[in-house]
Amino acid sequence: MNELTEILNRKELSRNDIIYLLSLEDKASLDSLYKKAYETKVKYVEKKVFFRGIIEFSNICAKNCYYCGIRKDNKKVKRFMMTEAEILEGAKWAYQSGYGSLVLQAGERMDEHFVDLVEKILIDIKRISDNKLGITLSLGEQMPETYRRWFAAGAHRYLLRIETSNIELYRSLHPADHDFNFRFECIRQLRKIGYQVGTGVMIGLPGQTIEHLADDILFMKNNDVDMIGMGPFIPHKDTPLADSLGNFEEKKQSQLELGLKMIAVARLFLKDVNIAATTALQSLNRVGRELGLQAGANIIMPNITDTKYRDAYQLYDNKPCLDENSTICKQCLKNRIATLGETIGYNEWGDSPHFLEKNKC
Ligand code: SAH
Ligand code: SF4
């Protein structure tokens, strides 16, 4: 048996095994990795994709992450906040289209007006969907009391990427007042309150090594996450990291590949968690999300934001589907998933089996 086969057949991967797998480059080895990850996915989370319709409802952000296109100091962005009626319209569309759940994402704001508004929107979404639509929030760092209120109002999952589990690398990507430890503490609080917790990282960041990425996978396991949302870093032209990877055109393929390897290794190592094939993969390759599903992911987050706002919510350059409305996206995804031989879990929450197992009475 060669070394790769031996590693892929191990029950538990070590840190060195993870580093070995993330370093693979030749096509035959990568195919073996993806195949094994796919088998693991089928065994633990079925051959079924769940949709989370994502509404990116505001690009107003109080923070200044160096990588992000909607950071506060990017004065070129026209700021927007959708009205409650527009958000509810999107939620209604998701519900009627059989999307079992919704993700509400926005720039980070801790002010009282915003906290109250989100609480009200959550209550209203639950009401118009007869309590059936599952709601995931991705609204950054908040006070524990805010997380509690939003949980009580109906949100039951929360995505908060740690971005990188390496504190020095984190510091190189954020201004000094963006605190890694506070972000980490937020993840702990979310779990304590009862949310299904998702985290993740950006992949292929300037200064990031394969060892950092291996440690990110260990971080997710050690923190017992239920969901993973991670994707390749894609520079945005109006940010301090615009040129940090040199000529990005030349890097696209390797960024995509690294993203897929991370999904595959995360699937092998964490097994029964939900893993998203993120939009950043699709930005690098038209069928990037489908490649993600084939590498072990089982969640897709179709953008259902009103197209008139999409241009202003660009966290990175060349975000796809800026002008395709939700109905076109739904049809296009449905066809592509059918060609992969997978089904779509319509009208289901598609909770993380890992979370359900932990909370079994
Ligand atoms: N403000 C919230 C949610 C919106 S940002 C928060 O920060 O948690 C959602 C995610 O977009 C971030 O966690 C980050 O991982 C990702 N992101 C931002 N800029 C990016 C870039 N240039 N390339 C890839 N992902 C990026
Ligand atoms: Fe704001 Fe999130 Fe972008 Fe950071 S990553 S600038 S918190 S939207």
Image (spheres, grey):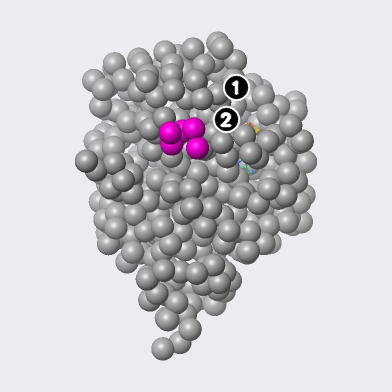
**Could you tell me which residue is drawn at 63 percent across and 59 percent down?**
212
Classify 69 as above or below 90.
below
Report the residue marked by disc 2.
141
* The quadrant where residue 216 appears: bottom right
Q: Is the magenta stretch mostly helix, strand or loop?
A: helix
- The mark that comes first in sequence, 1 or 2, is 1
Would you say 315 lies left or right of 271 here?
right
Name the residue: 71% across, 27% down.
72
SS of the residue under disc 1:
loop
Position in image of residue 249 (x %, y %): 68, 57
Residue 324 visible at all? no
Q: Which of 261 and 257 is in front in this view?
A: 261
Please state which amino acid type lies under the numbered disc 1: Arg
Above or below, comparing residue 166 to residue 5 in the picture: above
The response on whether ligand 1 sits within 8 Å of label 2 is: yes
Q: Nearer the viewer, residue 308 or 238?
A: 238
Residue 152 in view? yes
For image coordinates 51% across by 72% down, the residue present is 17
Residues under labels 1 and 2: Cα distance?
Answer: 8 Å
In the rendering, at what x and y percent does residue 283 appear?
Answer: 55, 49
Per the rendered image, the range of residues in magenta is: 188-192
Q: Does the magenta stretch include residue 189?
A: yes
Q: What number is the disc on residue 109?
A: 1
- Which quadrant, please, contains the C terminus? top left
Q: Which mark is residue 58?
A: none
The tally of labels here is 2
